[in-house]
Image (tube, rainbow, N blue to C red):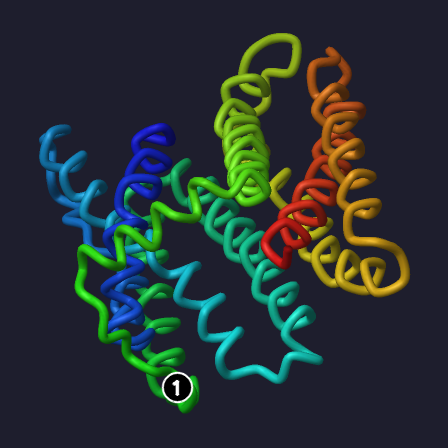
Amino acid sequence: MFLEAVSIILITLPILLPILDHFGINLYHFAIIMVINLELDSFLVITILRFIQGFTLAGVPAAALAYIGEEIDPKSSNMATAIYISSNPLGGMIGRVISGYFSEINWQYAFYVLMILGVLVFLFVFFALPKSNNFIPGNRSFKEDLKGFSYHLTNPVLLLMFGLGIVLQITYTGIWTYLPFLLTSPPFGLPLDTISLIYFVYGFGILGAPIASWLSNRFTLENVRTVAILLFIYGVLLTITPSLTLVLIGMCILCFGFFTAHSLTAAS
């Protein structure tokens, strides 16, 4: 499912971004609704629904960052970007703790709770977020938009940033995906509801993005990002030890390092 989600994002962003440029950001408020039928017992149908969900969600981060760039004062845009990115681990932490707790009772309860939270967030964003005042719809054809998008793929610097973001995200998500399998097996043998509590270390990621913004204003962005990546690697190495204490410390360090590097990569 993880590789499927990453593939969907990489495939659909070139399609969604030109549409976003033409019709604006508000169109993608609807993408936060969790559309899934909890009574399905067909893996194929669930996979198709997940594909649709991934397709709609792919444009949300791009839309949010575009909104910040267009509507927020340039002096505050870096901090706004950092706060937005730091909200991602907050959402990830809440979702995983809730799903881990309710899955021990009934996995469907977790989806019901997350669906309700998703609808509430959607309603809040839709009615509370100010309308775009500086958005100018594009007047280019869809073909021209795709050509312009492909132009970025010829820029070596951008390719490095794209590659760095992909490697960081795949590594980070892969570690958290594998974590439950690691901790439920010997020598740890932890129950699922206990493992879900470990996701509270996402709090270090919430702190990472604002701290990264603060440090980048005092040191160079490249130096801060390099230190963050080294911290991330060190945290990953700690997770391969047989000590639960070291694994937990490693998760804290890699969370802080990842979201620090992630926010600075997005800002650059």
Q: Report the residue that reaches farthest toward the right.
A: 218
Q: Is residue 116 above or below residue 70?
A: above
Q: How many marks?
A: 1
Front in this rendered view, residue 189 or 38: 38
Q: Amino acid at mark 1?
A: Ser
Front in this rendered view, residue 100 or 233: 233
Q: Report the residue that reaches farthest toward the top.
A: 186
Left or right of 153? Residue 267 is right
Left or right of 197? Residue 1 is left
Q: Residue at x 31, y 59 (%)?
A: 17
Q: Residue at x 42, y 87 (%)?
A: 134
Q: Residue at x 78, y 38 (%)?
A: 226
Crowdedness near tag 1: few (<14), some (14–19) or many (≥20) residues, C-alpha within 10 Å: some
Front in this rendered view, residue 194 or 226: 226
Q: Quadrant of residue 218?
A: bottom right
Give residue 200's position: percent from left, percent from top: 65, 47
Q: Name the image quarter holding the C terminus.
A: bottom right
* Residue linked to disc 1: 132
Left or right of 39? Residue 70 is right
Disc 1 secondary structure class: loop
Q: Is residue 259 above or below residue 166?
A: below
